[in-house]
Amino acid sequence: MRRSLPVVFSVTFVRHGETAANREQRIQGHLDIPLSSLGEKQATLAGKSLCKSVFTRAYSSDLCRAYTTCELILKENGALIPPIKIDTKLRERNFGSVEGLHIEEVKARAAAEGFSWPHHLPPGAESLGDLQARMVAFFKELCQSVYDKNKSQGESTSDLPAEDGEEAEVAGEMKSLKDCVPVEKILIVGHGAALKQLYTHIHTTLGCKLPGDPDVLNSISPNTGISEYLVQYSPKKYVMHCQRIHDGEHLKDL
């Protein structure tokens, strides 16, 4: 039986820029709050730092703080700019009844019910498990769509062998992956808590090694923090390499 050759592509994740709610430490969730003037500057600086990346696709949450960040990043790119595809699966966690409240009040409510934040589930809120499930669903659909589009080029873009056998998500690091030429470069702009759950899946479930302190998975990316991955994918296997995570170097002069 002929093996399915994998494809290699890169994914750049960026958290949206600052909003007034971020500055005031209020929970946003599904509240559609625009970028602050500082958030716009952060997004522009992120765009300048990514200006040499030739993105073939761009995805964003439908919430305006993410979409505007994506627009501002692409505005700084000198290459042919792809259209932004909106996907509601990239939305921030629905925090239910505590949206709009200050984080300290939310933590106090959680503690009063015997929980630590963010594991508390306020009325109407989305569980962390459900949040991770939809972020993983987005990622799997993305990987499959890249594979379906580019699988005919697999032999020329990657010399890493695909494995026969039962379908499984297998994670690992291969030195040669870093030397592969990606068939696509994809930009994804989303939200802090939602991206955190996806990174947790990538590094715990899929076993992708972190480039630095493993405690970084316990934190939220700074506004416009950049995380980059190389992905080798076939329907039977993932191999991933994390190039950087939560990188805010472009913000150092703000």
Image (tube, rainbow, N blue to C red):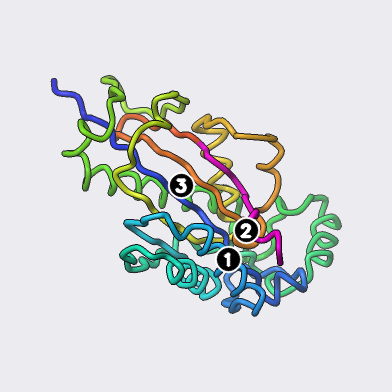
**Tag shown at residue 45:** 1
Q: Is residue 86 left or right of residue 135?
A: left
Question: Which range of residues does the magenta coloring cover?
Answer: 242-254
Q: Is residue 124 left or right of residue 144?
A: right
The x and y percentages for residue 78 are: 38, 65
- Secondary structure beneath dot 2 equals helix
Residue at the extreme left of the image, as rendered: 1
- Callout 1, which amino acid? Leu
Tell me which residue sits at (46%, 25%) in the image: 172
- Callout 2, which amino acid? His
Q: Is residue 92 above or below residue 39?
A: above
Q: Which residue is mark 2?
A: 250
Distance from disc 3 to disc 2, alpha carbons, whole Å, reads: 28 Å
- Secondary structure beneath dot 1 equals helix
Q: Which residue is mark 3?
A: 136
Q: Is residue 170 left or right of residue 201?
A: left
Dot 2 surroundings within 10 Å: few (below 14), some, or many (20 or more)? some
Residue toward you, 2 or 130: 2
Where, quadrant-wise, is the C terminus in this rendering?
bottom right
Query: Closer to the camera: disc 3 or disc 2?
Result: 2
- Secondary structure beneath dot 3 equals helix
The count of marks equals: 3
